Every structure is written in structure tokens, then in C-alpha cells.
Image (spheres, rainbow, N blue to C red):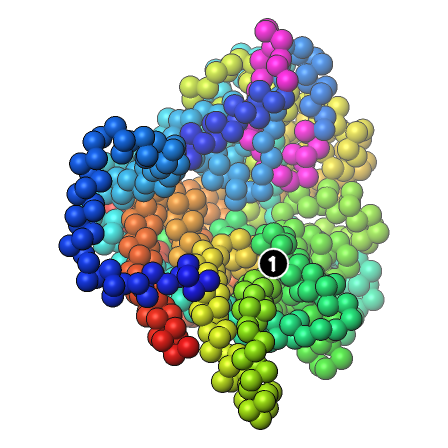
Amino acid sequence: MIGLLGGAIGFVTVLVGSAQGKPSASSVTIRVAVVSNSNMINIEKLTPAFEQMNPGIKVVYDTLNENNERSLIETDITTHANEFNAVMISNYETPIWAKNGWLVNLSPQLNADTSYDASDLLKPIANALSYNGGLYGVPFYGESSMVYYRKDLFKAAGLTMPLHPTWEQIASFAAKLDDPAKGIAGICLRGENGWGENLAALDTVINTAGGSWFNDGWQPQLTSPADEAATNFYVNLVRKDGEAGASNDGFTECETAYGSGKAAMWYDATVAAGLIATAYPTVSAETGYAYAPTGSPTGATGVPSGWLYTWSLSIPKGVSNEAQTLKYLEWATGKGYIAYSGPKIGWANIDPGTRYSTYALPQYKKAAGAFAGITLASINGANPNHPTDTNVAIPYVGVQFVDEPWFINLGTEVSNQIAAAIAGTESVSQALTTSQADATAVVKQAGLLK
Amino acid sequence: MSNVLDPAQQLPADRGSSAARRQRFRGSASLGGRRAWVRRLPLLPALTYMIVVTQAPFVVTLWYSLRGWNTLTPGSDRFVGFTEYRQVFADPNFRSAVVNTVELTASAVIIAMMLGTALAILINRKFLGRGIVRTMFITPFLVMPIATALLFKTTIYDPIFGLLDYVLSPFGVHQVNWIGTYAMPSVVLVLVWEWTPFMMLIVLAGLQSESLEAIEAAHVDGANAFQTFVSITFPHLRRYIELGLLLGSIYIVQAFGEIFILTGGGGGNGTATTNLPYYIYEQAFQSFNVSEAAAAGVIVVIGTEIVAAVTLRVLSGLFTASEAMA
């Protein structure tokens, strides 16, 4: 089925390719699959600059939403159809695919090219894209998580947001600021199903409460006291003082709700700061920023809890025109593109979280000074190798996911349960019991648990 | 209509002459290969096309279903017999998907048919602007399912910006998470909105083919409007309704876009709107479990064949019965 599908995609690609006018004999077309986030839309518009600098190379983008892009790339790579010269994937896929031998090790060529300055890439991000010491993807943008809050509403209510809030404080602020009569929710939190949606936020709450997905013997921990308390806390918070209809809300929905003044706080990706600044200037002017909240629901202190995520570009093994593709990767993730795109798309809106040098640019400091420091420190503070309490031993890597190939399946099932708990159609303990059973079946099938 | 759908009527006669039929068949085989093939030749391109686009993929699917291929796990593409089938049957999500599919299809088809019949009876009357009203009633069927689902999700169901919330807020219903709390009814409502026009058209065709003489005769005999409807119109409409139910079920059983956009298979106990097509999609394109998806696909095909065979037999029985009644 997949083979046929791959063939069909290939066929359509050929048709589309030939319909786009024949390039001259010496020119090379680079096909790139990207996610339709606004930063990627921006680079599509600015790519003619790259084509002017490299007259022999033409770049064609295939832009799809996250879920569809993932399945398209996954299908393309696993069937070795190699329709794309470069693919945009994340720090979830990169190490797994590198281990499977599906990606090109970029280190030798990048290290040889001093103008690219690979050592300028943020260490935690570069590490998350590495396997066995080799870099298999270059970050297009990187992110952690943080709290956005409305300074005007806090002032009116006589509240002060600390720079490093605890979840307990966030819950009490949300209770005071929740104002259904005015249509303003205390806090906007992700509730939509999808492992990259509600689980991303919830996992950080579980981590800082000392919970985890598995113990060091791969025994699932979803019904452990720490996981259960944290999940109850999250679900109750969003049900009581969160936005209405939270179980359908992901990043985009929360961005709209917060941006149009329907929420007093929002806990989400650091990259949203630039988007809010660009798309919702009035709300942005009243927005304050704080670190990802920490601590357990009972008030115990917890580890820094920001997540670590990056959309990065990789080259599948065995594709044609590797040298030209690498040139494109270096341009898209290089210092030059950041400097070039700043004036064009707005300095606050440039691709954050990839290079130390970005945070030293005076223009960026001026435009994004209020949040750039928190973003950088949060990325540096994220610890994918040990996201939870130091006393809790875990066998996996990843802050807001478990970096194993079977996790997509499990994550989707668990996120469905969490969404149902947030919608109130089942209880948290029911949701976690089902999730625990799912997780047990998955690790047993993977041969990790006897 | 009855001529087309009534092979059953001729069945008794045929049955008696099955020997003759065999004779005829043997006769055509011995006609000599050449003439037979000349006769078949115009059919061949269509037949080849049919086999290539429907049967070849099915055979490939059968092949994949006997392997253990998960594209994310290198080395998993090897023969494992019926392991994947066992796994599909052992998966509680598969079993609930079967139940969800029946629930979703039955409720959408039945509600759409009831509304469609009511609208058809209204539209069948003469009034000013009937053409415009009819066109407006048909329009929902012509909107793409994904567009419909998106419109419902963002402009109607949304608890913050949605019209449903706006309209109901004077009655104290405010900020209700429609999709999350009432996942299945939300999907059914969208499907009903899409499919009511289809049902309406079919029933309308039935109403317009009704013989006026029979109705006039009923009037002369002193029957009132209700009696006329129950005794004359409804029996006449019955086969149209059955046809609508059959076609509606065939299409709605495959509902995917509405679920993809509205609920992502969630709701209720976490998978309340995962029907069989969505279950297979999740297996193939979220878990990349190609073989399990293939096995589930084969099981669904077999199940559908059984249901369809029984339904068709029951329906053709009904046709004969109603024919006999008439």
C-alpha cells in the first residue's frame, strides 16, 4: 500500500515538476518538505535571494501541516522514494532516523566550512540533533516553553508575576483572573489530542512534579502518585480556569485566544513571543514573560521544566545533488539568513533558538529583549537526558516526548485520553488507567518489558 | 425504476430454465474463440483498468497484512503469518471502532432520511420561489466535506467565537465545549447536514413519480391527506427510502474528513469518534504500522462484503414483497 502510494506521490511529483517549466540544463532543483508554520512561510518568500546567490540551484517547497508533513516524509524516507532533497523534521525523529541509517551525517562538511560556524549553534539544540557525535540535522528554529501574561490584567487585579513562577502560583493567579463574564480565561493551556499538543505541555508539568513516563526498568509510571497528581492538577486547572473548549485547543487556537485578548495567561512555546509581537501588537505591548512554571501541585520545588524542541533540516541518505542541498541547508540555518531576514520580516520575528550569535545582535536585543533572554536561558536549562527529578531514574531521552520509534503511537493514544479528561467525558484516573495499559502493551511489544 | 431493480422478479421464471441457461452458456463458449473475443474486446480496457486499480492493490494489501512491517522499525518487513490479524482483533480500539462506525453511520443515515423525507414532502408542494428554496436545500451536499467540517468547527461549534454559543447564550448556555463534550453528536450533526439534501432528492424523485390517479382515486373514496400518505404515498416511497438508506450507508461508513477535522478520532472515552477508516488511517499514517493497517483493511473488506450481501438480499426481498403488494 505504502509502496504504491510512494509511487503515486512520485508520479505526481514528476508531473508537477515538469509543469513548472524546464530549468536550464545546468540547473539543479532542490525539493524541500517543510511544515506550514509562519517561520517556514517566511523563508519560502525569501528564498529567491538564495537562488540569486546560487544561479544553478532552484528550490521548490512542499508545505504541509505538521501531521501530514510527518506522514509524507516518513513514507518517503522509509520507502527510500527519496523525493525530497531535504526534509524538515524535529529533534524527536532526527536521532532515531540517524540510528536507522536514514540520514546524512552533516558534521564532516559543516565542520570543514568555517563560514557556517557550527560551534555557534546552541549546544542543547545541536546535541538533540546529534547521534554518536555526528550532527544529522541543522536547526531552523529552536524553542523551549514559557508563560505569557497580560501585565494590564495583573496590575488591575493587584497581582505580580514572579520571573520564576511555581505551578501553585499560576493556579492561584488563574483562579483570580478567570472572568467568564468578560470572556477572559484565567489561562490558556493546550488540550487538543496529539503527542505534540496536550502532552507537550502536560509532560513538563509531570517532569517538574517528579513524575516520568517509565521507571528505569521500563515499567510505565502513568498511574504513579506523582504522574496522577500532576495530571489531576493540569486537568483541573484548565477545566476550572482555562479557556472554554480546551480539549480542541492546540498551539494555534491558544495563540488566537491569547492574541485576541481572551486569556490572561498562556503557557506555550517560546517561539510564540515573536508571533504575538508581529501579529497582535496591542496584546504584545501588554505582555509580560516568565519562565516555565515549576514545582509539584503540593508545593514541593521541582526541576526547571521548559521543554526542548526544534524544527530542523536533514538530508535523507542517497538523495541526488547532496552538495547543492547542503548549500541550501547552510543558507537557511546560517547567520546570513538571520541578518537578511531581520529587516524583511521584523527583527522580533526572526528564527529564534538556534545560534548564540543571534542573541548578541543589537537589532534583535532591541526588538526582542523582553523575551529573548528567557528563551535562551530556558533552552540552556532544558535537560532531555534527565528531564525529571534527579532522584528519579529513567531509561529514556526527551523532555516532552520519549525518544523511541513507538512513542508516536503511544503518545497519540495517551493524548486522546487526556483530551477526554479535559473535556470531562471521563475521569483523570480512568484516562490514566487506560493510558497505563496502553503503555504496558507498547513496551512489552517493543521487547523492553517482560 | 422497477424494471432496473427487479431482476428478482424474473428469478422464478429463470430458475425453471436453468438447464436452458447452461445450454446457452455452453453454446456461447463454443461459438469459436474469435467471435467471442471480438465481442469482449470493447470491454477489455475498462476491465483491465478495474483490475489494476481495485484488485491489484487489494492483493498487495493481502501480502502486506501477512508481514510485520512497521516502516519505523528497520528489519520488521518479514513474513509473520496471521500475527497482525490477531493483533487487530486483540486491540480494544479496533473493537470500539466497529461499534463507533455502526453508531455513526446508523444515526447519520436515519436522521438524514427523516429530515430529507420531511423536506421532500414540503418541496413537492407548489409555492412561490420553490426553485430557489430547492437549490438552497441541495447546496450543503455540494460543499466539500473538509470545508463543511472546518466551517462547523471554527464558526459554529467554537465555544469562544462560535455561532452556536452566540445564539444559545441568551438561554444561559454559554461556553460549552460542543466538540469535546458531545463528540459523536457533533460529527453526526455535520454528516446529517451534508446528507439530508441527498435523501431529500431521492425521496423527491419518488414523490414526483407517484401516480396522480391513485391519489385522486383515494380522494374520491373519501380518504383524508394523512390516510392517503400512509396508505398510498408511503408504500410507494418505501423503495426510494430503502435505496437512500443503502446509498447513504455506503458513503457514510467511509466518513473520514469530518472526523479528521472535527475530533481527530477523540471524544468520550478518548476514541469515541474513531470509526474504521480513521482507525486504519491512524495505524498507517500515525503509527506507520503498515501491516497492521493492511490486516485491519482486509478484515473491514470482509466484514463489509458480508453486511452488504445480507443487506442486498433483504432489500431485494423487500422489493419483491412491495411489488407483490402493489
What residue is shown with label 1? Answer: B141
Q: Amino acid under label 1?
A: Phe
Instruction: Give the x, y percent position of residue A93.
Output: 45, 37
* Residue nearest the observer in this picture, B263 or A315: B263
Which stretch appears magenta?
A21-44
Q: In this view, does B214 lie to the left or right of B3?
A: right
Residue A106 vertical position relative to residue A363 in the rendered view, above or below? above
Q: In this view, does B38 lie to the left or right of A177?
A: left
Please report the residue visible at 56 percent of the width from the left and 84 percent of the height from the top.
Answer: B217
* Residue nearest the observer in this picture, B312 or B168: B312
Residue A301 vertical position relative to residue A120 in the rendered view, above or below? below
Please report the residue visible at 66 percent of the width from the left and 71 percent of the height from the top.
Answer: B123
- Residue A276 visible in the current orientation: yes
The crowding category of the residue bearing disc 1, from other C-alpha atoms within 10 Å (few below 14, some 14 to 19, many at least 20), is: some
Q: In which quarter of the image is the C terminus of chain B?
A: bottom left
Please report the residue visible at 46 percent of the width from the left and 62 percent of the height from the top.
Answer: B1
Q: What kind of element bears circle 1?
A: helix
Q: Is residue A345 left or right of residue A425?
A: right
Please report the residue visible at 69 percent of the width from the left and 70 percent of the height from the top.
Answer: B164
- Residue A114 visible in the current orientation: no
Q: In which quarter of the image is residue A350?
A: top right
Q: In this view, does A81 lie to the left or right of A65?
A: left
